[in-house]
Amino acid sequence: MVQPRGAVVGVLLAAGAGTRMGRPKALVSDEQGSWLLRACVTLRNGGCDDIIVVIGAAAPEVRALLGDLPVDVVEATDWAEGMSASLGAGLSRASDGDAVAALVHLVDLPDVGPDVVTRLVEHTSPQALARAVYAGVPGHPVLIGRDHWDGVVQAADGDRGARDYLVSHHALEVECGDLAAGLDVDEPPMLGR
């Protein structure tokens, strides 16, 4: 008999100011549309039962862009301290629910689609600790079982997020290079290229 995997909450980190981008990445769009809205669809279509969107910079504009989407919006008031603050805010909100794992995704990964999320969600359990890798290079999204949430938040510092915790706890590497490049986009594309 197949055991149910348990609920997975998607935690989308979209709080940064996007200094190198010239605007918050949650407000960036490309020829395929809004990165923020696309990331929400990616999480939902990839198998996340609920979605938490962590916002910070330009919060009113980001909130307006989300409109009536069925997502839980959390404002990280300390977002300027780095990814660790956003991650902490997202996992804190997730702990209010009954999800057994959180799938942490970043708004600036526009080429990561639902198939990557689905591949990670397959490893769901309260003890899960897995991250997408692209041609062997660690990236996002990251699946964090509920048993690890407190440890991840305590270990996260500045812009490092869960990186050190994932390494020290030997997170499962889930190869996704056949599905996406997994590159975060930090700067606007050069014109004429």
Image (spheres, rainbow, N blue to C red):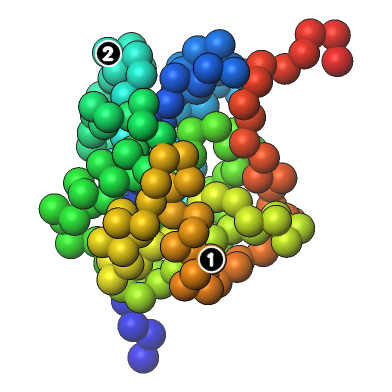
Q: Residue 116 occupies which quadrant of the picture?
A: bottom right
Tell me which residue sits at (36%, 57%) in the image: 155
The circle drawn on residue 96 is none
Q: Is residue 136 above or below residue 23?
A: below
The circle drawn on residue 167 is 1
Secondary-structure class at tag 1: helix
Q: Please name the amino acid that badge 1 sits on.
A: Val
Front position in the image: 125 or 86:
86
Judge from the rendering whether residue 146 lies leftward or rightward of residue 160; answer left or right. Answer: left
Which residue is tagged 2? 60
Question: How far from the left and from the top, in percent, is residue 67?
Answer: 28, 20
Q: Please name the amino acid that badge 2 sits on.
A: Pro
Question: How far from the left and from the top, in percent, is residue 2?
Answer: 38, 85
What is the quadrant of the C terminus in the image?
A: top right
Q: Earlier in the sequence, mark 1 or mark 2?
A: 2
The residue mark sitting in front, 1 or 2, is 1
Q: Is residue 35 above or below residue 158?
A: above
How many numbered dots are placed on residues in this image?
A: 2
